[in-house]
Image (spheres, rainbow, N blue to C red):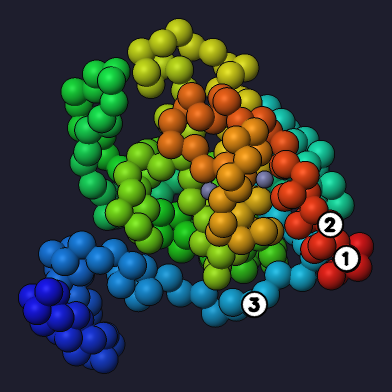
Amino acid sequence: MSRLRTFERKIRHYLNRLSEIRFKKKLRNYVSRIGISSLLDEIELVDPHPKKIILPCNLGILFCGDFKKKEIHENVVRQLENIYDSFFFNIIDLGNFKFSKKMESKGIKREKYRSKRNHTEKLPLHPTNKFYQVLIDKRIEHRLDMIMAITNLPIYSSEENLIFLFGETHLDHRCCVVSSLLLKEQFYNEKRNEKLFQLRLEKEAVHEIGHLLLGRKHCQNEACVMRKSKSVEEIDFKSIHLCPECMNQLELLRNRYNF
Ligand SMILES: [Zn+2]
Ligand SMILES: [Zn+2]
């Protein structure tokens, strides 16, 4: 514990001198040694326009990776419009985004996916805050209120000690990211199933947007889309819809914002 305190003290010291680039490098080293990536997150995310959401609002969807984008976008939009009826003026397709060569390798963690189904190779996972910064910039550029990234890259949380996430939301910055890799049957050495993949992706998109609207809490109702899923089986088990209690919370929002 005292070691941790020493590191934290040193981090604060470097934080105060961040204008010099060499201190940034040292800070990164300390943070990665302690494993508190939230500290890195605090430093890295630059958002000049943090504000509370006023509803209804505009949502943007950005694709990071290789997708049959048009179809996916249309299906996700249809579900979001259906479930969050009247919450969005517009759901905008922001097109495809690719990290620059320099960014691509930033923050990579190589991990094996551990499950009953054998995965032997290590995969390069990307930290969620890498997506958040891109999303913050795009959100500002396109004057959006909320923004979501859909990526085929595997991700790990910059907030918590979690790897191979289905998705994560950053409430303060009004953005979320959904990773599609683990939603594919091929990932588990099963036969490709586009329909199942699409439905899983829609559920996870509805889930993360649910967090942006209703907050970070998960629902305990097993059939509710706001239930936390630890596996694809759990995603398959829950429905794409909100339970009556979560629907009620949406209703309260509608009343509060008068729409
Ligand atoms: Zn969740
Ligand atoms: Zn619920």
Q: Residues within 10 Å of mark 3 (few under 14, many from 20)?
A: few
- What residue did someone put label 3 on? 51
Left or right: residue 104 versus residue 49 is left
User: At 27% from the left edge and 31% from the top edge, which residue is drawn?
Assistant: 113
The quarter of the picture where the N terminus appears is bottom left
Whether disc 3's CB lies below 8 Å from ligand 1 is answered no
Q: Is mark 1 within 8 Å of ligand 2?
A: no
Q: Position of residue 5 (x, y in %)?
A: 15, 81
**Direction right: furthest residue:** 259
| Outermost residue toward the top in this view | 191
Compute the Cα span from label 2 to label 3. Answer: 22 Å
What amino acid is labelled 1 in the image?
Answer: Asn
What element does badge 3 sit on? loop
Q: Residues within 10 Å of mark 1 (few under 14, many from 20)?
A: few
Amino acid tagged 2? Glu
Q: CA distance from mark 3 to mark 1?
A: 20 Å
What is the quadrant of residue 110 in the picture?
top left
- The image shows residue 201 at horizontal and vertical percentages of 58, 32
Eye-nearest disc, 2 or 3: 2
- Residue ID for mark 2: 251
Do the numbered discs 3 and 1 sit on residues whose CB atoms are within 8 Å?
no
Q: Which residue is mark 1?
A: 255
| Mark 2 within 8 Å of ligand 2, using the beta carbon | no
First in sequence: mark 3 or mark 1?
3
Q: Residue at x 64, y 33 (%)?
A: 223
Residue shown at 48% from the left, 24% from the top:
233
Asked whether the residues under the numbered discs 2 and 1 touch, taking CB atoms below 8 Å apart as contact, a structural biologist would say: yes
